[in-house]
Amino acid sequence: MARIAFIGLGNMGLPMARNLLKAGYTVSGFDLVQAVVTQLASEGARAATSARDAAQDADAVISMLPAGRQVEDLYLGEDGLLAALPAGRLVLDCSTIAPATARRVHRAAAAHGVAMLDAPVSGGTAGAASGSLTFMVGGATVTLEKARPILAAMGRNIFHAGFESAGQLAKLCNNLLLAVQMIGTAEAMALGTRCGLDADVLAEIMRQSSGGNWVLERYNPWPGVQANSPASHGYQPGFMAGLMAKDLGLVQETALQAGAATPMGSLALNLYRLLLQQGLGGQDFSAVQKLFIDQQ
Ligand code: NAD
């Protein structure tokens, strides 16, 4: 069974690493936050003191970091892992980052003889905990087949999106659509309740009608409608609004480079920026609901 170094044990990484342990993998975990490293160690992992320490002897490295800056630092920085990894090792970056950054890391990995996939995920923290994530993979088919058992320990659907960085491109398209669905749902919930409709009744009508969508099914932004949603728990993340704003920024960057029009994405980015300006970037992305509710 392969030995895995897991770098980035946050809202997503920690439950993903747990599922690798459950599947019988030997895991070394590293994060800048010591508490989560200690937590994973108490569940059977080795607590690493640095990313390089985690990666020594590892057959595969998985990274689940906030953004491209951290991913570039990890692999290409001064103490970068790619320079230290022996040829033939496997690198899976599951963070959501710019396709252009992913391509830079892919190129450097290839130059070091390291096989790499960009493998961002969908499914949120619930999917990470239950091992039912969707992986969107970019890179060589042969590398995907090598990585498949590892990905299968953390997810249910594994899609080969195509060439290097194709996973990131698919992920950005998905999150553009998710943001638009979230904002539209929040707007409709606010209008209906302002006009006197019961929030539960409205949510159920829309869920079962032509407005039905993933947000209404699993992630209603109106507090109290779904017992398990972040909205019903003070908008604790979940998926932070700041990360959604980052993804929507990447959507605009990508659209600009591709000459594509993404007006809904641009509006969504600006609404999330307003939320961040209110100091709510650390709350769940469903807190965009607050832009539509009177705050007095
Ligand atoms: P998070 O902020 O909860 O976790 C990131 C972790 O990385 C933190 O624990 C942080 O301390 C650690 N970290 C940062 N720099 C580091 C470094 N140099 N070395 C080691 N550890 C470092 O974020 P998250 O919600 O787990 O998201 C991670 C990635 O997954 C992001 O790219 C996000 O866009 C994507 N994502 C998140 C969700 C979700 O629902 N939360 C869903 C899909 C994709």
Image (cartoon, rainbow, N blue to C red):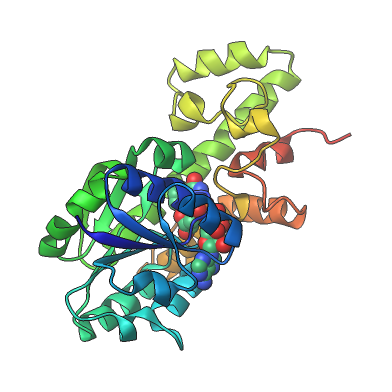
Q: Position of residue 61 (x, y in %)?
A: 32, 66
Q: Position of residue 72 (x, y in %)?
A: 43, 77
The residue positioned 57% from the left and 29% from the top of the image is 229
Work out whether residue 258 or residue 181 is closer to the camera in this orientation and state it: 181
Q: In the drawing, does residue 59 fall left or right of residue 81?
A: left
Q: In the drawing, does residue 72 fall left or right of residue 146?
A: right
Q: In the drawing, does residue 104 fall left or right of residue 251?
A: left
Work out whether residue 34 or residue 248 is closer to the camera in this orientation and state it: 34
The residue positioned 76% from the left and 54% from the top of the image is 279
Work out whether residue 213 or residue 59 is closer to the camera in this orientation and state it: 59
Is residue 249 something one can see in this rendering? no
Query: How many numbered marks does the figure carry?
Result: 0
Q: Position of residue 24 (x, y in %)?
A: 27, 47
Quarter holding the C terminus?
top right
Q: Position of residue 155 (x, y in %)?
A: 30, 42
Work out whether residue 133 or residue 19 is closer to the camera in this orientation and state it: 19
Q: Which quadrant of the figure has residue 15?
A: top left
Quarter holding the N terminus?
bottom left
Question: Looking at this rendering, what residue extends furthest in the bottom direction?
Answer: 78
Q: In the drawing, does residue 175 fall left or right of residue 294?
A: left
The residue positioned 74% from the left and 13% from the top of the image is 196
Question: Looking at this rendering, what residue extends furthest in the left direction?
Answer: 142
Q: Which quadrant of the figure has residue 187?
A: top right
Is residue 151 something one can see in this rendering? yes
* Residue 58, above or below 284: below
* Residue 199, above or below 18: above
The residue positioned 60% from the left and 44% from the top of the image is 285
Q: Which quadrant of the figure has residue 26?
A: bottom left
Question: Looking at this rendering, what residue extends furthest in the right direction?
Answer: 296
